[in-house]
Amino acid sequence: MLIGISPLLGPELLAVLCRMGHGDEIVLADAHFPAESVNARVLRADGLRIAELLDAVLPLFAIDSYVPDPVVMMAPVQGDALDPTVHQRYREVVDRRHPGTAATTFVPRFDFYERTRKAFAVVVTGETAKYGNLLLKKGVTPLSAAPQR
């Protein structure tokens, strides 16, 4: 255990977050997501819901403020519906941790998969909400967040 680091974050995920550079993307995927088919770097966070994991990650992670779509979700397939509470749960965390972050962008399913192919990593969670996947683009860590010597 580390002081100030959520116990929801295991060493593999902490290492991935640390190795990511600004502009890199990470996907917090639901339990049904075909992660192994679309990305070679897959981590497991079974049993965790995405909103909980997001709340643990965002104190350590700057969201890119230089792009129009740093927070992305999969849009429902035509004829299907997105449970609005899923997006609401994620946005509550994003807005609390990083006020002023651009609105969530919704992209078609196969565009989301394509973006996931290029992502730095995918974290498969225990999230069971339909269309519960979330992609985040890492921003530049502010100097004020870096430890001073």
Image (cartoon, rainbow, N blue to C red):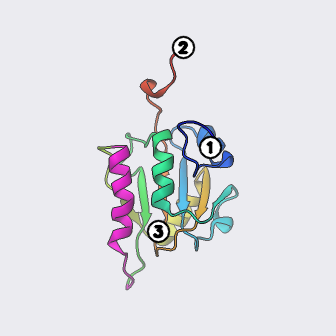
Please state which amino acid type lies under the numbered disc 2: Arg
Classify 18 as above or below 41.
above
For marks 3 and 1 on the same chain, the one whose residue lies earlier in the sequence? 1
The spot of residue 96 in percent (x, y) is 33, 47
Residue at the spot of label 1: 14
The spot of residue 1 in percent (x, y) is 64, 42
Left or right of 15, for residue 92: left
Residue at the spot of label 2: 149
Stretch of the chain drawn in magenta: 79-98
Q: CA distance from mark 2 to mark 3?
A: 41 Å
Residue at the spot of label 3: 132
Q: Residue at x 57, y 52 (%)?
A: 8
Left or right of 115, for residue 45: right
Q: CA distance from mark 1 to mark 2?
A: 23 Å
Q: Residue at x 63, y 66 (%)?
A: 35
Classify 83 as above or below 123.
below
Please state which amino acid type lies under the numbered disc 1: Leu
| Labels 2 & 3 near each other (Cβ < 8 A) | no
For marks 1 and 2 on the same chain, the one whose residue lies earlier in the sequence? 1
Please state which amino acid type lies under the numbered disc 3: Gly
Q: Residues within 10 Å of mark 3 (few under 14, many from 20)?
A: many
Q: CA distance from mark 3 to mark 1?
A: 22 Å
| Labels 3 & 1 near each other (Cβ < 8 A) | no
Left or right of 83, for residue 149: right
Query: Which-is-in-front pick, marks 3 and 1?
Result: 1
Q: Residues within 10 Å of mark 2 (few under 14, many from 20)?
A: few
Q: Residues within 10 Å of mark 1 (few under 14, many from 20)?
A: few
